[in-house]
Image (spheres, rainbow, N blue to C red):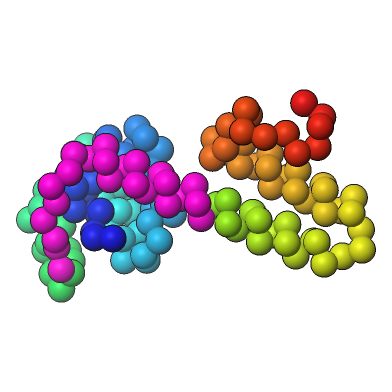
């Protein structure tokens, strides 16, 4: 996917209100640029404009963007959600190799609770233990 920092950087208050963090970006370059934008915004009270960003990252290719910022935030949210779910499933899969089903269930419930607390999954999606 194209560079999503382009549309997000000049309006950094919108992604901040959406709770976007640098970790939402899968590419380390995007993480650094977004972190730079956040730092600039916190220090100066305004987001860096395009000229400031290009001056700080002169060798970075900037693609034009055509969608509203909400679209890019939604895409980042989907990616982040998928990444956290996959990570959690991989954690649980490691426990499934053990002979202890209780430990596997505890790990699964811990991962499920963490995803729920992060609002990655919602309560009504599933109850796997029958405890709800």
- Hey, which quadrant is residue 17 in on the image? top left
Q: Is 47 or 11 nearer to us in this picture?
A: 11
Prevailing secondary structure class for the magenta stretch in the rendered image: helix
Q: Is 71 or 16 nearer to us in this picture?
A: 71
Residue 42 visible in the picture: no
Q: Position of residue 99 (x, y in %)?
A: 92, 63
- Count of marks, rendered view: 0
Q: Is residue 50 left or right of residue 79?
A: left
Q: Position of residue 30 (x, y in %)?
A: 31, 60
In the rendered image, the vertical position of residue 86 relative to residue 70, given as above or below: below
In the rendered image, the vertical position of residue 80 relative to residue 115, given as above or below: below
Write down the region rendered in magenta.
Answer: 61-83
Which residue is drawn at the image coordinates 19% and 47% (left, top)?
7
Q: Work out which quarter of the rendered image holds the C terminus and state it.
A: top right
Which residue is drawn at the image coordinates 74% and 45% (left, top)?
110
Residue 51 visible in the picture: yes
Residue 76 magenta: yes
Residue 50 magenta: no
Q: Is residue 50 left or right of residue 126?
A: left
- Hey, which quadrant is residue 12 in on the image? top left
Q: Work out which quarter of the rendered image holds the N terminus and state it.
A: bottom left
- Hey, which quadrant is residue 26 in on the image? bottom left
Q: Position of residue 80 (x, y in %)?
A: 46, 50
Which residue is drawn at the image coordinates 35% and 59% (left, top)?
31
Q: Position of residue 107 (x, y in %)?
A: 78, 51
Q: Residue furthest left?
A: 51
């Amino acid at each position: 996917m194209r560079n999503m920092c382009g549309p997000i950087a000049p309006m950094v208050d919108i992604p901040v209100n959406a709770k976007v963090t640098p970790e939402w970006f899968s590419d380390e370059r995007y993480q650094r640029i977004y972190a730079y934008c956040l730092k600039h915004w916190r220090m100066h009270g305004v987001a860096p404009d395009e000229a400031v960003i290009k001056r700080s990252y002169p060798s970075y290719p900037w693609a034009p963007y055509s969608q509203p910022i909400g679209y890019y935030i939604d895409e980042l949210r989907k990616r982040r959600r998928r990444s956290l779910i996959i990570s959690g499933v991989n954690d649980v899969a490691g426990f499934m190799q053990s002979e202890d089903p209780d430990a596997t269930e505890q790990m699964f419930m811990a991962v499920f609770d963490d995803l729920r607390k992060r609002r990655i999954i919602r309560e009504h999606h599933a109850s796997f233990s029958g405890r709800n």
